[in-house]
Image (cartoon, helix red, strand yellow):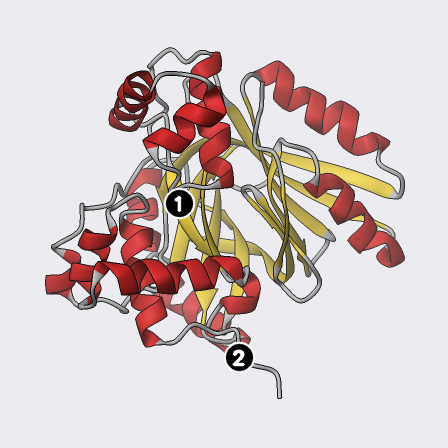
């Protein structure tokens, strides 16, 4: 009999502590969960080694950066092949096979408008069997960071951990250089890498690495995140929603939508829709009640597109196999 890959309650509590504070000490994580530091570290390592969870990093987030949501249509019998090709491009941070008018949904970022244009206009159309590419440039990410293990820790336990950043994500004005990128790339491989490890892999003195980490984190350029592999998720379904709202009062609409349980992100875009909303639901039958609740809260909100995630191909620095296990590490180096 195959052993379940779904984390137990203690594993989920450890994971949620790391969602809130990915680089917290094991002493702090253990205190939040109610176990000793050694047990917390051992259980996390078991989850990581089994490819059920990982801690990674976004690319450096600066004012020069650009992003877009991209819909790709392709031949039905080549969807997996195309998605696999797209996922191996360092600029494709999220690749989902989805239902709806497009076969593949991609979240892409670049360090400049030219880099974004090259991905959308040059590289994607050259992939065999790609038939249509529709881009929705991102104006702002107003809410991001839904927690896969929300509820696994009590309120008092969460107070032990640093409060996570929520709300509008503001690009950092801090200048970044090659060393900053080398640190970021190493953290994408292992988001809990120690200062000593980062010093060895980047070739910079430990004091320099520590100083750079503090600066990048304080300025919001570096964002480390704990994630579950699809095979370890506790069930449910993810849906991307394309939403149209009147331009006046968009900020209030964002706040309205972000308050609903299950909403992971709300992004303002320039395209066929005003907003893209990612929502996690317990089952597909919950989608209609969710939409009804949103429209009751604000009748001017129009949900005009729905893409149900059928298969996760890539999330940040990890590519998944057909079973949803981590299969390989992908580059997030956008230089």
- Counting other residues with Cα less than 10 Å from the Cα at mark 2, is it few (<14), some (14-19), or many (20 or more)? few
Is 276 in front, or is 82? 82
For this view, does 203 lie left or right of residue 26?
right
- Which quarter of the figure has residue 320? bottom right
Q: Determine the residue positioned at 18% across, 46% down.
A: 163
Is 10 in front, or is 155? 10
Q: CA distance from mark 2 to mark 1?
A: 24 Å
Residue 36: % across, % down: 20, 64
Q: Determine the residue positioned at 56% across, 32% down.
A: 332
- Counting other residues with Cα less than 10 Å from the Cα at mark 1, is it few (<14), some (14-19), or many (20 or more)? many
For this view, does 130 lie left or right of residue 159?
right
Secondary structure, mark 2, is loop
Mark number for residue 4? 2
Q: Check the image and name the residue furthest to the bottom.
A: 1
Q: Quadrant of the N terminus?
A: bottom right
Is 93 in front, or is 310? 93
- Which quarter of the figure has residue 149? bottom left
Q: Considering only order in the chain, which callout, 1 or 2, is on the residue closer to the N terminus?
A: 2
For this view, does 28 lie left or right of residue 294?
left
Residue hosting label 1: 225
Residue 93: % across, % down: 57, 39
Q: Determine the residue positioned at 50% across, 49% down.
A: 243
For this view, does 259 lie left or right of residue 59?
left
Q: Quadrant of the C terminus?
A: top right
Secondary structure, mark 1, is strand
Mark number for residue 69? none
Is 221 in front, or is 248? 221
Q: Is residue 260 visible?
A: no
Q: Determine the residue positioned at 40% across, 37% down.
A: 141
Q: Is residue 329 visible?
A: yes
Residue 259: % across, % down: 28, 57
């Amino acid at each position: 009999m195959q052993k379940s890959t779904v984390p137990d309650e203690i594993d989920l509590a450890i994971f949620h502590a790391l969602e809130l504070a990915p680089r917290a000490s094991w002493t702090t994580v253990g205190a939040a969960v109610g176990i000793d530091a050694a047990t917390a570290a051992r259980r996390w390592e078991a989850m990581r080694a089994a490819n059920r969870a990982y801690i990674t990093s976004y690319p450096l987030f600066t004012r020069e950066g650009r992003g877009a949501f991209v819909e790709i249509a392709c031949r039905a019998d080549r969807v997996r092949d195309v998605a696999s090709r797209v996922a191996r491009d360092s600029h494709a941070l999220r690749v989902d096979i989805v239902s709806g008018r497009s076969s593949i949904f991609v979240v892409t970022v670049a360090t400049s408008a030219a880099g974004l244009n090259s991905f959308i206009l040059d590289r994607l159309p050259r992939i065999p069997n790609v038939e249509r590419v529709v881009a929705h440039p991102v104006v702002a990410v107003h809410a991001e960071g839904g927690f896969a293990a929300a509820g696994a820790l009590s309120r008092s336990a969460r107070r032990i951990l640093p409060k996570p950043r929520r709300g509008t994500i503001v690009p950092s004005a801090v200048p970044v250089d090659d060393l900053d990128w080398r640190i970021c790339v190493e953290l994408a491989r292992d988001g809990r890498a120690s200062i000593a490890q980062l010093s060895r892999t980047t070739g910079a003195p430990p004091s320099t690495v520590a100083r750079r980490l503090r600066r990048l984190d304080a300025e919001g350029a570096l964002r480390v995140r704990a994630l579950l592999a699809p095979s370890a998720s506790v069930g449910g379904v993810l849906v991307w929603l394309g939403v149209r709202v009147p331009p006046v009062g968009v900020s209030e609409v964002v706040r309205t939508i972000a308050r609903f349980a299950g909403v992971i992100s709300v992004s303002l875009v320039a395209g066929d829709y005003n907003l893209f909303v990612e929502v996690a639901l317990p089952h597909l039958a919950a989608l209609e009640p969710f939409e009804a609740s949103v429209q009751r809260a604000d009748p001017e909100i129009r949900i005009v597109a729905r893409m149900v995630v059928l298969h996760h191909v890539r999330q940040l620095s990890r590519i998944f196999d057909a079973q949803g296990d981590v299969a390989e590490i992908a580059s997030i180096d956008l230089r």
